[in-house]
Amino acid sequence: MPANNVTFSLENGTGCTGTEQCNVPSGANISSGGAFSWTLGATGTYKLKVKVSDDGSPNLSDDEQIIITVAPASTTTTVQVTPGSQQYSDLVTLSATVNGPGTPTGSVQFTIDGNPVGSPQTLSGGSASLSNQPVTQAPGVYSVNALYISNSPNWNNSASGAQNNLTVTKENATLGYTGPYFAATSSATATSANVTLNALVTQAADGNTGNLTNAKVEFVLL
């Protein structure tokens, strides 16, 4: 007597509650040899049955329910600051790339020394940037990080694993005295005179329009 042939098929599961799904997921397949394949879809719990049938007489069949739980995918975030060294009040660009299965969506919040910089920037193709950001920190070295904020249950949030540093230097400026060099007393016997001292602070031509409003000038009479 020849051996019976068996066939495999997928059927909807049973006993789903809440957000669990009992329909055979779209794209799920099982081969003639019983090999199951499915490119994982959205996060959640899926219940489906694998059924095996033979062509004997009588026909016999059996099924087994399987449960597949799709969890959010892990992501990694990298951050970069360009240029890495910049003068106070000049401009930098902060950029971040979020990697994970597929193309993560959502936004990125940049921070400098833990303080948020600007508003969250929307990802496009897994990347986001904050361009022409004025440097408001005093001269020194600061840590730059990026926090990925997912807008989908398919990806977990992640912070940049390796921070980048921003080195802030003093604004490059020149000072020139523009006030009077001579003063006259009100009379031949007067020993003092009122003089208005003036100076002009000019930023060096470095390709950035810096902010010199915090510059201070000290006048010294020799």
Image (cartoon, rainbow, N blue to C red):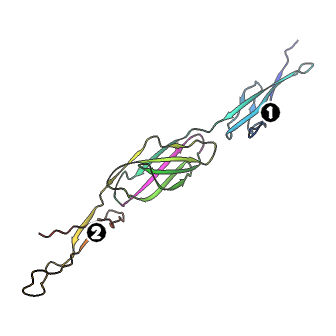
Compared to residue 158, the image places residue 84 above or below, namely below
Q: Is residue 175 above or below residue 136?
A: below
Outermost residue toward the left?
A: 189
Q: Which residue is drawn at 50% across and 51% down?
A: 109
- State whether residue 218 is above or below residue 14: below
Looking at the image, do the residues carrying marks 2 and 1 touch, with CB atoms under 8 Å apart? no
In depth, the one of 28 and 155 nearer the eye is 155
Task: Say above or below: 42 vs 166.
Answer: above
Image location of residue 24, percent across then percent down: 77, 36
- Secondary structure of the residue carrying numbered label 1: loop
**In which quadrant of the rendered image does the N terminus lie?**
top right
Across and down, in percent, residue 99 comes to 54, 42
Q: What stretch is highlighted in magenta?
A: 89-103
Q: In which quarter of the image is the C terminus?
A: bottom left
Residue 144 placement, left or right of 47: left
- Dot 2: element: strand
The amino acid on which the numbered mark 1 sits, given as a three-letter code, is Gly
Whether residue 93 appears in magenta in the rendering, the answer is yes
Residue carrying label 2: 202
Q: Which mark is residue 200?
A: none
Q: Is residue 18 left or right of residue 165?
A: right
- Residue occupying the far right of the picture: 58
Q: How crowded is mark 1: few (under 14 residues within 10 Å), some or many (20 or more)?
A: few
Q: Dot 1 corresponds to which residue?
A: 15
Amino acid carrying mark 2 in the image: Thr
Mark 2 and mark 1: Cα distance apart in space: 76 Å
Q: How many marks?
A: 2
Give the mark nearest the N terminus, 2 or 1. 1
The secondary structure that dominates the magenta segment is: strand
Q: Closer to the observer: label 2 or label 1?
A: 1
